[in-house]
Image (cartoon, helix red, strand yellow):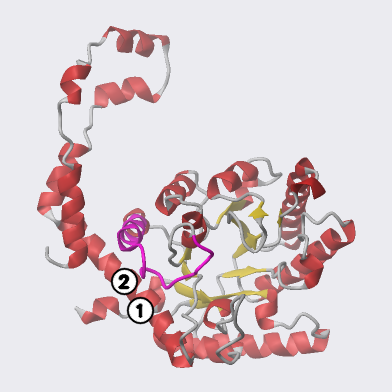
Amino acid sequence: MADLYQPKPEHKFTFGLWTIGNQGRDPFGAAVRLPLKPTYSVKKLSELGAYGVNLHDNDLIPFDASASERDQIVKEFKQALNDYGMKVPMATTNLFYHPVFKDGAFTSNDPKVRAFAIQKTMNAIDLGAELGATIYVFWGGREGAEVDAAKNGPDTIKWNREAMNFFTNYVKDQGYSMRFALEAKPNEPRGDLYLSTTGHMLHFIETLDHPEMVGVNPEFAHETMAGLNFLHGVVQAYEAGKLFHIDLNDQKMSRFDQDLRFGSENIKLAFLLVKFLEDTGWDGSRHFDAHAYRTEDEQGVWDFAAGCMRSYLILKEKARRFNEDSEIQGMLSEIRVRDEELEGLMSAYSAESAKQLRTMDFKPDELAKKGLQYEKLDQLTFEILMGVR
């Protein structure tokens, strides 16, 4: 049974260089861990059973690196990927750390800053393509405001749209096999961030020149910060064909962005999320965008990474048991009522279907008397998770 919980490359678990490389800084304290060399991180994650690593441009290449320094760093990193059989499925750009982005990148009031952000992103897209990334994530960490009076709101939307249109056309022009995934967050580090939820992003995508190239990268912590149900956002994105990537971590509701180890806080929701991804056969990477507690040394970082993957696999096994539990499945067959005739009438409007529905007596008082067994189902789900079924 223990082998069920041993990560393997086919599980497609990935970590960002910024996640395992997090040094434990916070607004009230300095770093508690030394930096990790990217090539060393590749080696260690490979030993733990991960599939790949993801990165911002500056996770690998310093902001002020020369062209020759850049090429040497990339050469060594590509060699490490080859040596340890690791992939780079996703890449992104750091448009939030340098002071030049203090008032945004694509939504800065200064057109020189916006142009620099586009230049930097083109270079980072080239890097991602060189490393084999097929997904490119955009998280607008500084795209927001504390003083709304300082920005003309429609401009911020227009500038964001122009940037995404620029990049989709750039990727097409370069012949890269790359799609974009937009990542929402309600706030932090800005007081308020634009396009703050997955729902906002899904609408925004439909206004782009090439919406077929753009999806979303929902993050567990970000939706939970806003008091939303992360699973619902993932389901909506999946149903729309827009779940291009996913960030797995954990979070206490209505707190600052905690990026906790996956499964460490909201066990039932994490279980239902894993069950959904596995039941649907979603083929994307299971990316962990989290970091070790500030209390940890380097060994604690690897314990954290192993824990994320092991927790996912434990919940995957719980989902299998749920799906094979005869009592649960019997209840679900009763709860999820099917009626082909009624469903056919409701699936698409016609004058005839409207006429038939008007004439039917649904006996609502009788329907209202029926208990739905949700209490028992929830208890049985709990028992699956606690290992007593």
Labels 1 and 2: the sequence-earlier one: 1
- The amino acid sitting under disc 2 is Leu
Choose top left, top right, bottom left or bottom right for residue 69: bottom right
Choose top left, top right, bottom left or bottom right for residue 129: bottom right
Q: Mark 1 and mark 2: span between their CA atoms?
A: 8 Å
Residue at (16, 54) in percent of width and height: 380
Q: Are marks 1 and 2 in contact (CB under 8 Å)?
A: yes
Residue at (59, 65) in percent of width and height: 134
Q: Which residue is mark 1?
A: 7
Whether residue 154 is visible, yes or no, is: yes
* Side of 186 relative to 338 (left or right): right
Q: Secondary structure at mark 1?
A: loop
Q: Nearer the viewer, residue 91 or 138?
A: 138
- Relative height, residue 2 to residue 352 (above, below): below
Q: Nearer the viewer, residue 202 or 81?
A: 202
Q: Nearer the viewer, residue 21 or 15?
A: 21
**Which quarter of the rendering shows the N terminus?**
bottom left
Q: Secondary structure at mark 2?
A: helix
Q: Which residue is mark 2?
A: 313
**Which quarter of the rendering shows the C terminus?**
bottom left
**Stretch of the chain drawn in magenta:** 255-276
The x, y position of residue 211, in whole percent, is 64, 46
Disc number placed over residue 367 in the picture, else none: none
198 falls in the magenta region: no
* Side of 58 relative to 343 (left or right): right
- The amino acid sitting under disc 1 is Pro
* Side of 223 relative to 138 (left or right): left
Q: How many neighbours does mark 2 have within 10 angstroms: few (below 14), some (14-19), or many (20 or more)?
A: some
Residue at (70, 88) in percent of width and height: 73
- Relative height, residue 279 to residue 289 (above, below): above
